[in-house]
Image (cartoon, rainbow, N blue to C red):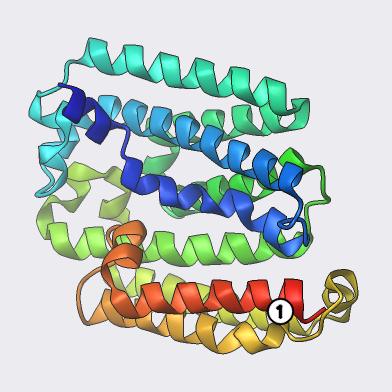
């Protein structure tokens, strides 16, 4: 039972909440112990929020998940965890997260509430509306990024919004394509919006967001405003990592039929994992040692 409850909160997905730390890194605050602890606390609280959202999603979707070749093995869909136990755990996670957010600061608490509201609405309504389903997922990542800024009291950059939004859209459309192709005729039974997509439409969406991710990141690194604020003009050195990472992910989507879980791809695909690590190390060196 304990093992199934642990699986239910999906700790493997907590990696997504690393986005909360983006503001800390790019604001040049990572060397300050107090700010680092606040940012890590914020990321931890979002792990509680996101786990509560996953439980709610599994509760609502447990019937449709039984139609999915992989999701049917989830604790609720398989019947290994009862609905009552899942609801109790979800309530505890939400309450602990909100209390912790209140102690951090009011702005962070409000952003946390927005995150919960958006994701509950996504599970109930938005995930069944074509295009808006992917945009809702992307906006939840933007909320994470802004929450990190509010947690440490630094301005939320418009570049943070733009880059996070397009990258998350790119990943969301890639996930929809994987689901559509892998489930074929059962796709709409699992998720209503999949019946309104086509591989061609999703390929077009992926193409647009691919260009947006690369171009907007390049503009960010070459921006004089950003260079002046960060005290360095060498961020452009990280562009090759972003370009390769995006193209590698496209390869996995189209040739390896992966992309169903970006987190699983990040952990399981060694070239992408190495690329992300090299990108992060390069960013840290540039921001904290080449200023």
Q: Is residue 204 visible?
A: no
Q: Is residue 240 left or right of residue 110?
A: left
**Residue topped by disc 1:** 286
Q: Is residue 258 left or right of residue 40?
A: left
Task: Kindly indicate the quadrant of the structure image that contains residue 215.
Answer: bottom right
Classify 42 as above or below 235.
above
Which element type, helix, strand or loop, lies under badge 1? helix
Task: Kindly indicate the quadrant of the structure image that contains residue 175.
Answer: bottom left
Q: Nearer the viewer, residue 9 or 165?
A: 9
Q: Position of residue 11 (x, y in %)?
A: 34, 41
Q: Nearer the viewer, residue 123 or 150?
A: 150
Classify 84 as above or below 17.
above
Q: Identify the residue at image location x=64%, y=26%.
A: 101
Classify 122 as above or below 145.
above
Q: Identify the residue at image location x=27%, y=24%.
A: 59
Quadrant the N terminus occupies: top left
Q: Is residue 27 visible?
A: yes
Quadrant the C terminus occupies: bottom right
Q: Position of residue 31 (x, y in %)?
A: 73, 57
Q: Identify the residue at image location x=54%, y=77%.
A: 279
Task: Kindly indicate the quadrant of the structure image that contains residue 221.
Answer: bottom right
């Amino acid at each position: 039972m304990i093992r199934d409850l642990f699986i239910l909160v999906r700790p493997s997905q907590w990696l997504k909440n690393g986005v909360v730390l983006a503001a800390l890194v790019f604001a040049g605050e990572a060397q300050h112990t107090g700010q680092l602890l606040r940012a890590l606390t914020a990321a931890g609280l979002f792990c509680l929020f996101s786990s509560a959202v996953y439980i709610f999603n599994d509760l609502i979707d447990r019937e449709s998940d039984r139609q999915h070749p992989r999701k049917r093995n989830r604790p609720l869909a398989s019947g290994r965890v009862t609905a009552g136990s899942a609801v109790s755990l979800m309530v505890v996670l939400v309450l602990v997260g909100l209390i912790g957010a209140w102690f951090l600061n009011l702005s962070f608490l409000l952003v946390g509430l927005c995150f919960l509201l958006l994701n509950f609405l996504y599970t109930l309504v938005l995930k069944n509306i074509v295009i808006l389903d992917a945009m809702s997922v992307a906006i939840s990542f933007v909320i994470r990024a802004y929450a990190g800024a509010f947690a440490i009291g630094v301005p939320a950059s418009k570049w943070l919004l733009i880059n996070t939004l397009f990258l998350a859209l790119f990943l969301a459309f890639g996930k929809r394509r994987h689901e559509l192709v892998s489930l074929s005729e059962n796709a709409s039974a699992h998720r209503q919006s999949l019946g309104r997509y086509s591989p061609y439409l999703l390929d077009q969406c992926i193409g647009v967001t691919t260009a947006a991710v690369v171009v907007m990141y390049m503009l960010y690194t070459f921006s004089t405003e950003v260079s002046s604020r960060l005290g360095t003009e060498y961020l452009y050195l990280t562009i090759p990592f972003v370009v390769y990472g995006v193209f590698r992910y496209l390869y996995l989507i189209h040739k390896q039929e992966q992309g169903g879980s970006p987190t699983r791809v990040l952990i399981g695909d060694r070239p992408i994992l190495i690329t992300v690590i090299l990108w992060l190390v390069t960013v840290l060196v540039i921001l904290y040692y080449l200023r």
